[in-house]
Amino acid sequence: MTKIALIIEKSSKSDSFLNRAAVITDGDVDAADAAAPLRPWRVCTVRQVEDLKAVLRILPLWSSSIFLSISIGVQLNFTVLQALAMDRAIGRFHVPAASMVVSSFVAVVVSLGLIDRALLPLWRALTGGRRAPTPLQRIGVGHVLTVLSMAASAAVERRRLATVRAHGEAARDDPAWVSPLPAAWLVLPFALSGAGEAFHFPAQVTLYYQEFPPSLKNTASGMVAMIVALGFYLSTALVDAVRRATAWLPDNMNASRLENLYWLLAVLVAINFGYYLACAKLYKYQNFGK
């Protein structure tokens, strides 16, 4: 009969099937030299098993943020095209269409300052001096602001297309026709998007760094970069799928139905928020407050 021994170290009861990776059997020990070290590809330490459990527990929360980056990627790309078809004049100066993206970064910087200097002190005052909102709470606020940002983008685009229709078929059929609607309207959705990023990206870095095991602390900082990269790649796949399945995105922006894409994103991000709430409800902090 095969002899079985267990490494004596405290292990958690969650995902207990993974604990079998720390079970030592006869095949894990060199029969010719009992004093030889265990074969690392056949048996793990309990610490390694617990580290894997910590990563697996946080992966659902991590995956719920991918759709945030998808929506931001779509918004960044199409806002430039929207700006090209809107009035960008400030006196005699015409604002470059691509520079509209800068308003998102400005919103992030301003929002970070407001959160640190105004919202957090207000939170502590309202809660009787309790600690700041948890990372999961801040990420949730970021989800809500992203939904509002997509809805705002849809509303602005709907208003732009209304001016196109008001000028008749000649305006709709002319790709170079510029709406009299000021491009400054695009700042509103970018402000909401930037505020959402100021909430959820720093909170995600905090969450991953505090919850990842010590051996993976350096990896934690790269999790957000993976979300951004994967989200932007998937945003191009989403746009390509929409162009194949619908007539919403022709080459002529004045004949497009871009607002439908934004509404679709708003609905998908809202559904994704429900998924996030379920993941956050089930998740139990391992190191928060320590």
Image (cartoon, helix red, strand yellow):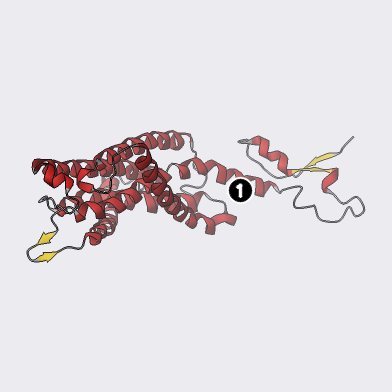
Find residue 50 and report its horizontal and vertical position in percent: 63, 45
Front-lying residue, 47 or 202 = 202
Residue 118 seen anywhere in this rendered image of the structure: no
Q: Which amino acid type is shown beneath numbered disc 1?
A: Asp
Residue 42 in picture, x, y percent from top left? 77, 48
Q: Which residue is mark 1?
A: 51
The location of residue 252, given as percent across then percent down, is: 23, 48
Q: Please identify the quarter of the rendering in which residue 152 is found.
A: top left
Q: Is residue 241 left or right of residue 162?
A: right
Residue at point 59%, 56% (across, down) = 215
Q: In the image shown, does 10 or 168 lie closer to the viewer?
A: 168
Element at label 1: helix
x, y (%) of residue 202? 38, 54
Q: Residue furthest right?
A: 32
Left or right position of 136 against 44: left
Front in this rendered view, residue 53 or 148: 148
Going by the image, does 8 lie left or right of 141? right
Q: Could you classify mark 1 by the number of other residues whose Cα lies within 10 Å: few (under 14), some (14-19), or many (20 or more)?
A: some
* Residue at image location 24% in from the left, 40% down from the top: 257
In the picture, measured across the screen, residue 66 lies left or right of residue 255, that is right
Q: As displayed, is residue 121 above or below residue 257?
A: below
Residue furthest left as drawn: 91
Spot the residue most to the bottom. Answer: 92
Up-down: is 245 above or below 37? Answer: above
Which quadrant, please, contains the N terminus?
Answer: top right
Total marks shown come to 1
